[in-house]
Amino acid sequence: MSKSLQSENLVPSAFHADAKQVVDIKSDNSSDQDANHIAISSISKDEPLVTRRELWSYYLYYNGDNGVGPLGYTQTLFQGLATAAGYDPIAGPGSSCLATTASGQCVVPWGSGTKSVSSVVLIANGISFAIMTAIFTTVGSAADYGTFGRWLLLAVTVVCWAAQYACMALTTPNRWVLAMVLYIIGFVSYGATLVFYAAVFPRLARNTPHARQLREKYESGEIPPEVYEQEESLEKNRISNISTVHSNIGYIITLLLNLALLLPMTNNPKVDNYVLMLVTTYWVVLGIWWFVLQEPRPGPKLPKGERYLTIGWKQIWAALKTYKHLPYTFVYLFSFFLLADGLNTTGTLVSICQNNKFSFSFLQNTYLGLSQAITSTISTLAFWYIQRYWKISTKKMFVATNVVTILIPLWGMIGIWTEKFGFHNVWEFWAYNIVFGLFQAPYYAFSQTMMAELSPPGFDNMFFGLFGLSNRASSMVGPNVIQVIINNTGNNWQGFPFLFAMCTAASLVIWFGVDVTKGRRDAVRWAAEQRRHAH
């Protein structure tokens, strides 16, 4: 599946806060600011200019970090092993879930009883999101300081590589618990790579040659604030969209490479494990260059007396207390938390249905993935062209993708009452992957740019950490609610109504409750106020 970007660094660039302010910095709330301020140095104008080589290494990292392994194949392997190890509760212990006479239900031992395989997969996702929550809240905003963010991205990347290579050990059904553990480790570390990778993007966006020229023209009075604001937003969208395209190109290339193993080795029992090794090696070869070619743009030193493991919580608490100064930023964060929860859980539930339909076939999932990756690449470029040509705001583009977000669980909901539609047929999974590619890949790019525009300049990791919480780590509600529904009903489709309601409610709030222009100016004002207190 395509996925989202997310977080790490020190300064989106909604505006250069040391430049002329688009809005006057007001101090009528200075007493509140004194209580809530977070010490951080002002934005440096001396950061290295982004070179073509550095920018390409950034894109290539995402090309390799395309999610085929940790998001797709590992879940299929885990679910397949658990299903092979389980039994049909209708036929009783000793029966096979894979028998032609099986009822379609499948349970595995769980604690003192049993639990359906679908519920176990959802529980694994819930655990993963809980761990990600702990990571993002504890060390997310700490990455704003010094070079911690750079090393943090390297650490979570290496952990993800190791977990994927370890999947070579997953060869028999009795290792389904180990498969669950490796899936959780891989999924958590993969989600963390997205967050800390994406937080680099505001820093890069403000240091491209074009962004520098824009800022110089703005500071010299050659262009008005409105033009600077629009052009700078388009520059952020350019990098965000190009990186998303690279992710999808990597997705296509990886899947095509996998066919070189899956087709000639169809009858080899270890072919799925070999495929995971190939996928991971592709990421290693392309991803390592970012850590070699990245220019040093360190954040300020850690404040005296603070620790990396505690400053994150302090900053998040301080940031949360500023909700009245940044109302649109927090409305977006909260709404996106629910929207991402609904979308992520919907994707997991559709994948569970898809794996069951195609008997956990890596080959069939590869074909379906190719259809999604190709349409994702085309749509991301098309949406970017449309936005750039007509200069449409990021929010309007984001809203267009939200409509499809709502329709996916609605379609699944139909499957409760009929087997003619609602993810019961092979053609529906082809349609789902194509539609998902057409609309959800741009959704990820625009959601990130929305966050960049609503983040206070100089506090990227703090707010992108909260965004990461809203996106990759959001699904603590969905999986836990859905797994209870499925476990009690024995019907995967009963989970879709809850997800439809969640996606619809969140989308409506974003559509009518978030003013990006006002939110961006609030963010600039707040960031400048923090720096004034810090000095």
Image: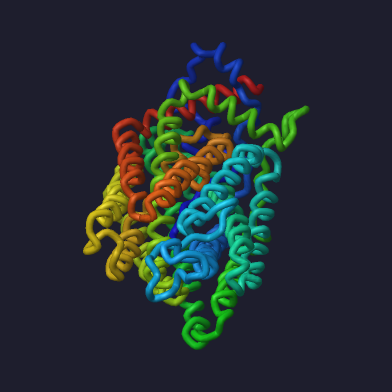
**What residue is shown at x 39% (from left), y 74% (from top)?**
367
Q: Is residue 185 something one can see in this rendering?
A: yes
Q: 13 or 274: which is nearer to us?
A: 274
Q: Quadrant of residue 38?
A: top right
Q: Residue at x 39, y 33 (%)?
A: 225
Q: Is residue 406 above or below residue 93?
A: above
Residue placed most toward the observer, 491 or 226: 491
Q: Give the residue at the far front of this rendering.
A: 92
Instruction: Say which quadrant the C terminus sits in.
Output: top right
Q: Residue at x 64, y 72 (%)?
A: 168
Vertical arrangement, residue 460 with respect to residue 35, above or below = below
Say which quarter of the image contains residue 174.
bottom right
Pinpoint residue 129: horizontal percent, then vertical percent. 54, 46
**In the image, what residue occupies the spot 40% across and 70% down?**
102
Q: Is residue 158 above or below residue 77?
A: above
Relative placement, left or right, of 249 versus 182 is left
Residue 402 lies, in percent from the top left, at 31, 46
